[in-house]
Amino acid sequence: MKAVVTVDAGICGFKTRIQADSDDAQNVSFQVASGCEKAGGFGAALTAKGPVDGYAELGAGSDGVILTTARETLKGCCAACAVPIGAFKAMQVAAGVALPKDVSLGIAAE
């Protein structure tokens, strides 16, 4: 299955397209395209690690490949970037463990 997630990261203005593909409903490969150098670096590092085992990733939680790669590559203001969550959601859909559904964050200062 193939899943595509488009992330509009917010005030930075960068958009990222994440494509997750799985031929066996378990092992997921990624392609990440972004106008952001840091998000692109995250995508390149994630892709370089090879297919991600979607079932193992679910059990690993924050110690899984996707979020560990995010911690390794996204520092400073980018530490809270929404791109890794988009990659995780794409992985879930590609592995067949979740249905596709938009996720939304509303952010306001009060």
Image (tube, rainbow, N blue to C red):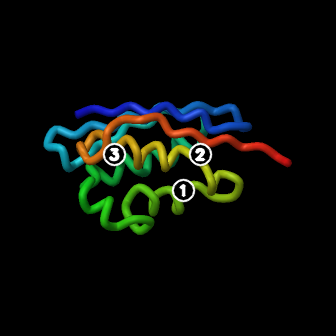
Earlier residue among tags 1 and 3: 1
Could you tell me residue 85's position as x and y percent?
Answer: 49, 49
Q: Which residue type carries mark 3?
A: Met
User: Image quadrant for the N terminus?
Assistant: top left
Alpha carbon of mark 1 to alpha carbon of mark 3: how far? 19 Å
Give the x, y percent position of residue 109.
Answer: 82, 46
Disc number lying in front (1 or 3): 3
Residue that lies at the very extreme toward the right in this rendered image:
110
Q: Gap in Å between the C-alphas at discs 2 and 1? A: 7 Å
Callout 1 amino acid: Thr
Q: Secondary structure at mark 2?
A: helix
The span from disc 2 to disc 3 (Cα, nearest Å) is 20 Å
Sooner in the amino-acid sequence: mark 2 or mark 1? 2
Q: Are marks 2 and 1 in contact (CB under 8 Å)?
A: yes
> How many neighbours does mark 1 have within 10 angstroms: few (below 14), some (14-19), or many (20 or more)?
some
| Amino acid type of the residue that numbered disc 2 sits on in the rendered structure | Lys
Give the numbered dot on residue 91: 3
Q: Residue at x 47, y 34 (%)?
A: 102
Residue 93, quarter of the rendered image: top left
Query: Which residue is rendered at x = 49% and y = 49% of the image?
Result: 84
Query: Label 2, on which residue?
Result: 38
Q: Which mark is residue 73?
A: 1
Q: Is residue 77 left or right of residue 92?
A: right
Q: Is residue 40 above or below residue 13?
A: below
